[in-house]
Amino acid sequence: MRITPADDLRCLRSGCSKRWPRPAPPGKVGAMTASGTLRAGLPTLDRDQRSAIRRPLTRHLPTRLLPADLLRIADQGAADILDGRYDALLPAQWDRSTRSAIRLQRRDDLELWLVSWVDDGESELHDHAGSLGALTVMSGSLREYHWTGDDLKVRVLGAGDQAAFPIGWVHDLMRDPRPAGAEPGSAPTLTVQAYSPPLTAQSYYEVTEHGTLRRTRTELKDLPE
Ligand SMILES: [Fe+2]
């Protein structure tokens, strides 16, 4: 039986598989805060400069949105998809051979995507240039390799899980291998991904034989990875 995006969403709505849960009420999300402040006390800086570096780093980001905001927006996007708000944007059929992304919203400071992940072997360590990001897994699962500064750390994100990507986050995302017993060509992993500002570029990396990270190139790119 050919499974269409509408079938997948009906399945999620009716609870026939592990489904993404409804988002918590406003105010429940927000455990993640902007990371720290810079160490002050550099003697060669004037008062204004010292004051500037004592401010939270978020004051210097190119967006007013925080990772917690993007997590909430991604969650709300998933709820809106299940409620049918974006049905007109969904394709007649998911492409089962390659990853695809559907832009759900775009404004000056935010872009929201629905991404369909397949086993296409396409993966590479990358950052998101000057954009923050966050995602909610609606169905299936993703595997992420994240550069910690010393090595790559792996985690698996299942339906209902969320992840945020601060500026400077270097990772590689791919569909987690199918669970044992799953049919080949089964429904892709679906995620809702939010970026602020919208993606414009990504840099790519490789881990060297010395265990360091080497940036190999930067590309103008507005599609999520
Ligand atoms: Fe990414």
Image (spheres, helix red, strand yellow):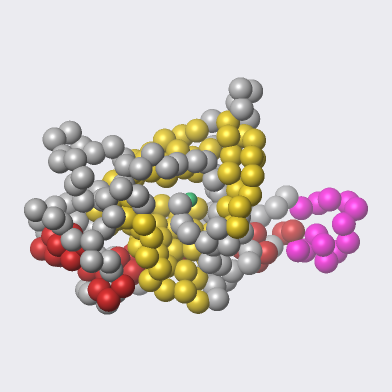
Residue, far right: 44
Q: Residue at x 49, y 63 (%)?
A: 195
Report which quarter residue 200 is drawn in. bottom right
Q: Position of residue 176 (x, y in %)?
A: 31, 40
Q: Is residue 38 left or right of residue 96?
A: right
Q: Is residue 140 left or right of residue 77?
A: left
Q: Residue at x 36, y 52 (%)?
A: 99
How many discs mark residues in the rendered view?
A: 0
- Residue 160 in sight from this viewpoint: no
Is 99 or 141 nearer to us in this picture?
A: 99
Q: Position of residue 106 (x, y in %)?
A: 47, 74
Q: Position of residue 122 (x, y in %)?
A: 42, 42
Q: Position of residue 206 (x, y in %)?
A: 58, 34
Report which quarter residue 210 is drawn in. top right
- Residue 141 is one of the magenta-drawn residues: no
The stretch of residues the image draws in magenta is 40-52
- Residue 98 in sight from this viewpoint: yes
Q: Residue at x 45, y 41 (%)?
A: 123
178 lies above or below 72: above
- Residue 44 is one of the magenta-drawn residues: yes
